[in-house]
Image (spheres, rainbow, N blue to C red):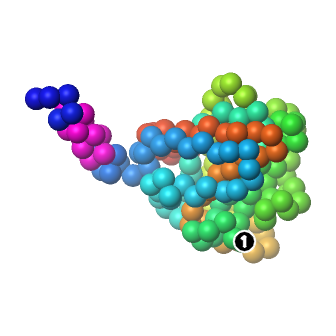
Amino acid sequence: MNTFAVILSLTYFVSSAVSKHPGCHGSSIETPNLYKYILLSDYGIDIGNKETGNIKFMVKASNDAHVALLSSNTDQEPLYEIVLGGWANSKSVIRDRKQGIALTTHYGPVLKQNEYRTFYINWSKEHIRVDDEWKAKIMEWTDTSNPFNIRNIAVSTGWGSTGYWSFPCTAYQGE
């Protein structure tokens, strides 16, 4: 069997294994220094359960790693915006719209420019929680005014930062 056939066979095996295990995608995304959201669904990353869910990811960026929990398959509102390491990596916030006011804030650096940092985001219809790589709570917020179902997730960086995102093949089960 030639090298090309072996690679093709391995590719088929890996993609078959991924499709049998929801949440196992092993995808990587690079976001430019431009505040523009990239949909995870465009990279084949399925968030699974829409009403109560979670996602584990790793990101390497100097500042301003943004995650949008979307009510549709676009970055139009309504949405929840999670900013990790904003304001020169000095604080993180949860907002109920793009560039909205901070509804909860965590002070202190959470990102590293040259090192991946792991985060977990859990949500229910009205509740959002963000944990760090040690599964310690960074932020938590409950929408008591107008909660909506999460249908997709998008990521972005900006304000002087490029982001390198990794979505590992291990689903987070809220351990």
In this view, 154 is above or below 59: below
Image quadrant occupied by the N terminus: top left
Q: At 20% from the left edge and 38% from the top edge, which residue is drawn?
A: 9
Q: Quadrant of residue 98?
A: bottom right
Q: Which residue is mark 1?
A: 77
Residue 85, visible in the rendered structure: no
Q: Position of residue 135 (x, y in %)?
A: 64, 36
Residue 165, visible in the rendered structure: yes
Task: Name the foreground residue: 36 vs 48.
Answer: 36
Residue farthest along the top direction in this orientation: 114
Q: At 66% from the left edge and 66% from the top edge, which residue is drawn?
A: 75
Q: Main secondary structure of the magenta part?
A: helix
**Is 11 a magenta residue?**
yes
Q: Position of residue 147 (x, y in %)?
A: 71, 71
Image quadrant occupied by the C terminus: top right
In this view, 14 is above or below 124: above
Task: Name the foreground residue: 160 vs 133.
Answer: 160
Q: Position of residue 85 (x, y in %)?
A: 79, 39
Task: Name the foreground residue: 172 vs 2.
Answer: 2
In the visual, does 112 lie left or right of 40?
A: right
Q: At 57% from the left edge and 68% from the top edge, which residue is drawn?
A: 73
Q: Quadrant of residue 138?
A: top right
Amino acid type for the residue under numbered disc 1: Glu
The residue carrying pointer 1 sits among few (fewer than 14), some (14 to 19) or many (20 or more) residues within 10 Å by Cα, namely few
In the visual, does 95 lie left or right of 157?
A: right
How many marks overall? 1
In the image, the segment drawn in magenta is 6-16
In the visual, does 106 lie left or right of 16?
A: right
